[in-house]
Every structure is written in C-alpha cells, then in structure tokens.
Image: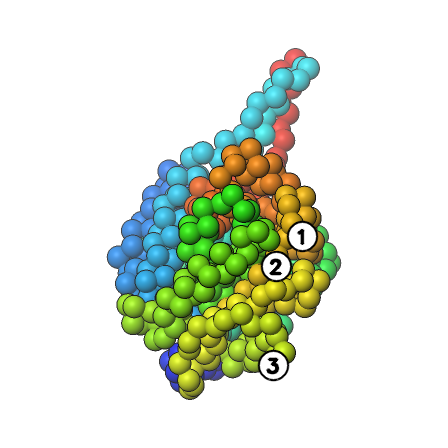
Amino acid sequence: MIQVLEPATAGVMAEVPRAGVEEADAAVEAARSAFPAWRALAPSERSAVLRGLADALDSHVEELAVLEARNAGKPIGDARGEMGMVVETFRYYAGAPERLAGKTIPVAGGVDMTFREPLGVVALITPWNFPLTIASWKVAPALAAGNTVVLKPAELTPLTSIELERIALEAGLPEGVLNVVAGPGSVCGQRLVEHPDVAKVAFTGSTEVGRGIAAAAAGTIKRVTLELGGKSANVVFADADLEAAAEAAPSAVFGNAGQDCCARSRILVERPVLDAFMERLEAAVGRIVVGDPLDESTSMGPLISAGHRDKVAGYVPDDAPVAFRGRAPDGPGFWFAPTVLCPVGNDDRPAREEIFGPVACVIPFDGEEEGVRLANDTIYGLSGSVWTRDGARALRVARAIDTGVVSINSNTSVRVATPFGGFKQSGLGRELGPDALEHYTELKNVYYATG
Ligand code: NAP
Ligand code: MG
C-alpha cells in the first residue's frame, strides 16, 4: 500500500494500493481493448461524453479541492481555482472532436486529403505539485482526439487522479478508456514508458527524469512530450510600475510554496530602482500568510515532503545573502518560510538550479541588453515576465527571451486556450490550446486517384 501523507501535519491521510509492473500491464491492456470502440464513436458522441464528464467534475469541485489542498498542501482558495481550471479544460476539449479537421491539398490526378488519427494507448505521467490540473491538461485532449489513457500520478499525490477515474466512470466514460495506476515512477512509470503497446508518453516533471524518459521511449520510437523544469526570470525595468511589479512578484515565486515550474524565481531588477523595489517587495512578502491549507486566510502552505524541505533548505546555508524572510509555523508539517536572497549573481547556485521552493533570488542588472542576456543565461526556457511602461521595449524583450511563455506586466503563464510549454531543456511540445491536440494525433495523408 502507498501511505499518502498530509504535508501540513505529516500524518497519513489515506492508503491506496501500490501499482507495479503487473498493474501497469493490466491498465495498458484495458486501454488497448477499449481503444477501437472509443475511436469509432461519432465525434458528437465523444464530445457529449466529455461534456458529461466536465459537468460531473463541476459538481465535485469542492470535495476535489479539499482533497487536493490536504494532499498537496496548497491553500484551499488556490485549490478551488485549480479545480475550476480542470473543469474548464474538459469543457474546452469536449468541443474538439468535431473540430479535428484535416485539409484537402491540390495535387495532380486526384484528390489528396489529410486526417488527424488518434495514436492509440497513451501513457500520461504527472507530478505532485498540481496533480489534477496537470492531469486534466493531458487527459482531456488525449481523450478528445480518440485515444485511450493510462494515467500515472505521482506517488505522493494520487488521490484526486483516483477520484477522476471514479467520477469519469460514473459520468459514462466507457470502461477502459481512462485507467489510473498509482505506483512508483521507477517501476510502474518506467514500465509504461517501455511498454510496446503504449504509443506515446506525455510527461510532466523534472528535467532529470524527463531525460531518462526520452531515452527509454526511444526503444520503441514512442511519441514523447515533456513539460520539465524552469528557472524563469521576472525582469523589472526602472520605468516599470514598481508598486504593481512588487505586489505581483511574491505570488509568482511563493505561490504553491514555490513548487511551480513557472515560478519567476529569478527577479532581475534594474539597478537604479533596486532599493525602491526591495522595500516594496519586503512589505508584500510580509503579507504572506503561511499556515493550514484549509484555513481560508492562508496564502502559502507547507512543502510536499520532509525530504523536499531539506533539499530547499540546502539552498539557504548560514552564509546565504538573506535580505528578508517571512514567517512559517513550526513542525510537525513540512514548513519553510518565504525567503528572499539579494544580491545574487546569476552564476550562483541558487540562481542556476531549480529550487522548487519558496526562495527568490534578486539579481540586479544594468540596461536592457544585460537584462535579456541574464534572463537567457540558463539551461531552462519555460516562462518569464517583463515589467516596463515602454510598449516597444516590452515587445522587444518578450521576443528576445527564449522561453515558451512570456507575460508583460503580469506574472501569469497558463490559460486553457493558449499554448504552454518549454524552450531548451524545459521540454518538448505544447499543452493546452488547440496545439496540444496535434501531440495526441498522427497526421494521415490519403490520396484518391480520380483519373
Ligand atoms: P519527477 O520526480 O520528475 O516525477 C514526475 C513523475 O514522473 C512522477 O509521477 C514520478 O513518479 C514519475 N517518474 C519518476 N521516475 C520515473 C521513471 N523512471 N519513469 C517513469 N516515470 C517516472 O517530478 P516531481 O518531483 O513530481 O515534480 C517536480 C518537477 O516537475 C519540477 O522539476 C518541476 O519543474 C516539474 N514540473 C514541470 C511542469 C511543466 O509544465 N513544465 C509542471 C509542473 C512540474 P513518482 O513520483 O510516483 O515516483
Ligand atoms: Mg520527484
């Protein structure tokens, strides 16, 4: 059995069966058997099933939010917002089956047309930081495109994914179309990646594990999409609305206790406004309330595990340049106070590695050219922000930053209808929006001779 912990108390909140190789194989077999009928459903019928699933999830938002808040240690208000996005994601892709149109192409001697065909069985492997949200970004487009699914949630946070399977069956998703296996990545996940009957792996997690998955998938030439780590820059120019930039900066790195692949954990501040920005940032960080995820006034919860807390603490040794820190409760949960380091050099270890915890690095810079250079001086390329009142500069810098998403005068990265994904070692492929569907289909070309 897997003992599922509640990070705020370090207590066991549930036990679930631990899936291994045998369970992974059984899930793939169930998905393989369900594929022909699911694929053959009329697009309008597949659409109706997915709309029904979205409605069913909508009616369970509150209980799912409480489960996610407790298991992942996130503030209940945030968890509600995430469950809202899960519902919205299923609604969005419920409209897709009837829009997966091909093209006709003018050629000599006949008619040439393209079709978007489903891949077959797809394995979806998800992390513990946004468990059901990230699952929905994969499950919804995969099913909409006519695939059947094996979903492997992270062992630390399997509960809402298990609920998703239950709710889906209740809502009328045919048996075998969605199969959830909760088990360790190195056993259950690895088996899915190597399984000859799995056509594609969609993975979200660390760059390190992603590398191994890409290598293992090569054995059977599986399609692979990867959403990996980040070390995103929040570039604040001297001409920015400093109040707004400083007010928005904390949630962009302390949101979800910093366990966010899009965290703007490198705050690049143009030197002339460094002091003014830091003063405002300190006030904003002072307003963060770290505590019980189920308390409505909490804005930051604990870290996911004791091991992860120790890893994060390793980035803040005694001689670290701590400018200021917030407050956090004492044990027994896995607490860590929001911490701001300043000044940090872009070559320093906390600025190079993904900490995945509530530690912000403030890096002073001089001028636009240096700002862009430092923003890009990383192996990652997921997100980023530009704060300036100069519209031309905003677009110039947004285009020059090598990341999949850049926001101007905002720190948001994710919207259901727009593409999300990484440049460089932050990943391969895109999720959300219409683009995600391409990664769950093969392009078929049919030529009909008319001569
Ligand atoms: P992780 O350690 O890479 O694990 C992610 C998933 O992969 C888990 O389900 C894990 O299972 C599984 N796994 C581990 N080894 C595997 C293997 N050999 N074969 C198949 N599956 C395997 O990541 P995490 O610690 O859960 O999450 C944190 C990381 O995710 C951070 O680096 C973060 O940046 C990244 N992330 C990226 C995005 C994005 O969209 N780009 C979003 C969120 C998070 P078990 O944990 O059950 O063993
Ligand atoms: Mg991990």
Q: Is residue 169 left or right of residue 405?
A: left
In this figure, which residue is indicated by the disc labeled 3?
Answer: 318
Amino acid carrying label 3: it is: Asp
Q: Residue 176: x percent and y percent?
A: 45, 59
Residue that appears at 54% across and 39% down: 394
Q: CA distance from mark 1 to mark 2?
A: 9 Å
Disc 1 + disc 2, Cβ < 8 Å: yes
Is residue 244 shown to the viewer in this render? yes
Q: Nearer the viewer, residue 367 or 143?
A: 367
* Callout 1 secondary element: helix
| Mark found first going from the N terminus, 2 or 3 | 3
In this figure, which residue is indicated by the disc labeled 2?
Answer: 363
| Mark found first going from the N terminus, 1 or 3 | 3
Is residue 33 shown to the viewer in this render? no
Closer to the eye: label 1 or 2: 2
Q: Residue 226: x percent and y percent?
A: 61, 55
Residue that appears at 53% across and 52% down: 273
In this figure, which residue is indicated by the disc labeled 1?
Answer: 374
Q: Nearer the viewer, residue 445 or 414?
A: 414
Q: Residues within 10 Å of mark 1 (few under 14, many from 20)?
A: many
Q: CA distance from mark 2 to mark 3?
A: 19 Å
Q: Residue 370: x percent and y percent?
A: 68, 48
The C terminus - image quarter: top right
Amino acid carrying label 1: it is: Leu
Amino acid carrying label 2: it is: Ile
* Callout 2 secondary element: strand
Q: CA distance from mark 1 to mark 3?
A: 26 Å
Q: Quadrant of residue 291?
A: bottom left
Query: Cβ of disc 2 within 8 Å of ligand 1?
Result: no
* Callout 3 secondary element: loop
Q: Is residue 76 left or right of residue 308?
A: left
Q: Residues within 10 Å of mark 2 (few under 14, many from 20)?
A: many
